[in-house]
Amino acid sequence: MLLPEEHWYTLAEAAVVLDRRPETLRGLLWKHQLPRRKVRQGQHPRKVLQISYRTLQRLRRLTRQ
Protein backbone atom coordinates (compact mmCIF):
# COMPACT_ATOMS: atom_id res chain seq x y z
CA MET A 1 0.00 0.00 0.00
CA LEU A 2 1.42 3.36 -1.01
CA LEU A 3 1.12 6.28 1.34
CA PRO A 4 0.66 9.80 -0.05
CA GLU A 5 3.80 11.89 -0.01
CA GLU A 6 3.88 14.40 2.83
CA HIS A 7 3.59 18.03 1.72
CA TRP A 8 6.27 20.42 2.93
CA TYR A 9 5.75 24.18 3.21
CA THR A 10 8.41 26.86 2.96
CA LEU A 11 8.57 29.23 5.90
CA ALA A 12 7.16 32.02 3.70
CA GLU A 13 4.15 29.88 2.72
CA ALA A 14 3.53 28.92 6.36
CA ALA A 15 3.70 32.60 7.36
CA VAL A 16 0.93 33.44 4.88
CA VAL A 17 -1.24 30.55 6.07
CA LEU A 18 -0.80 31.45 9.75
CA ASP A 19 -0.81 35.24 9.22
CA ARG A 20 2.51 35.60 11.06
CA ARG A 21 5.93 36.91 10.11
CA PRO A 22 8.48 34.28 9.00
CA GLU A 23 10.87 35.50 11.71
CA THR A 24 8.24 34.77 14.38
CA LEU A 25 7.71 31.24 13.07
CA ARG A 26 11.45 30.63 12.85
CA GLY A 27 11.82 31.61 16.51
CA LEU A 28 9.02 29.26 17.53
CA LEU A 29 10.58 26.40 15.55
CA TRP A 30 13.85 26.77 17.45
CA LYS A 31 12.27 27.49 20.84
CA HIS A 32 10.05 24.40 20.76
CA GLN A 33 12.54 22.26 18.79
CA LEU A 34 10.00 21.44 16.10
CA PRO A 35 11.00 19.32 13.10
CA ARG A 36 12.17 21.16 10.00
CA ARG A 37 14.47 20.62 7.04
CA LYS A 38 16.70 22.71 4.83
CA VAL A 39 16.68 22.10 1.09
CA ARG A 40 18.31 23.75 -1.90
CA GLN A 41 15.68 25.33 -4.11
CA GLY A 42 15.50 27.56 -7.17
CA GLN A 43 17.48 28.22 -10.33
CA HIS A 44 20.41 29.51 -8.28
CA PRO A 45 20.15 27.11 -5.37
CA ARG A 46 19.82 28.61 -1.95
CA LYS A 47 18.94 26.95 1.31
CA VAL A 48 15.25 27.16 2.14
CA LEU A 49 13.70 26.12 5.45
CA GLN A 50 10.70 23.81 5.08
CA ILE A 51 8.20 22.45 7.58
CA SER A 52 5.75 19.57 7.35
CA TYR A 53 1.97 19.81 7.61
CA ARG A 54 2.10 18.38 11.16
CA THR A 55 4.56 21.08 12.19
CA LEU A 56 2.33 23.71 10.57
CA GLN A 57 -0.60 22.48 12.68
CA ARG A 58 1.56 22.61 15.81
CA LEU A 59 2.58 26.20 15.01
CA ARG A 60 -1.09 27.06 14.51
CA ARG A 61 -1.85 25.85 18.04
CA LEU A 62 1.12 27.76 19.46
CA THR A 63 0.18 31.05 17.79
CA ARG A 64 -3.51 31.08 18.74
CA GLN A 65 -2.78 32.54 22.17
Image (cartoon, grey):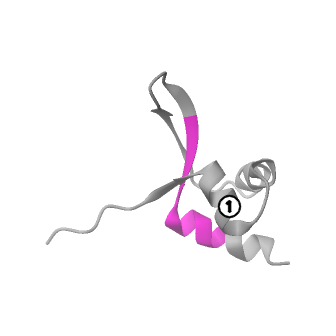
Question: In this rendering, would 14 be left or right of 1?
Answer: right
Question: In this rendering, would 59 be left or right of 24?
Answer: left
Within the magenta stretch, is there residue 55? yes
Q: Residue at x 68, y 61 (%)?
A: 16
Q: Is residue 59 visible?
A: no
Residue designated by label 1: 16
- Which is nearer the eye, 43 or 34? 43
Q: Residue furthest front?
A: 43
Image height of 64 relative to 44, above or below: below
- Which is nearer the eye, 56 or 20? 20
Question: In this rendering, would 53 be left or right of 65?
Answer: left
Within the magenta stretch, is there residue 63? no
Which of the image's four quarters has the C terminus? bottom right
Q: Residue at x 13, y 72 (%)?
A: 1
Q: Residue furthest left?
A: 1
- Which is nearer the eye, 27 or 23? 23
Q: Secondary structure at mark 1?
A: helix
Q: Which quadrant of the structure image shows residue 28?
A: bottom right
Tell me the kind of residue under disc 1. Answer: Val
Provide the residue span drawn in magenta: 48-58
Question: In this rendering, would 6 be left or right of 30?
Answer: left
Badge 1 crowding class, 10 Å Cα cut-off, few under 14, some 14 to 19, many 20 or more, is few
Q: Is residue 51 visible?
A: yes
Residue 45: % across, % down:
48, 24
Q: Which quadrant of the structure image shows residue 59?
A: bottom right
- Which is nearer the eye, 23 or 43? 43
Image height of 17 relative to 25, above or below: below
Q: Residue furthest top?
A: 44
Q: How many marks overall?
A: 1
Residue 32: % across, % down:
73, 58
Residue 57: % across, % down:
60, 72
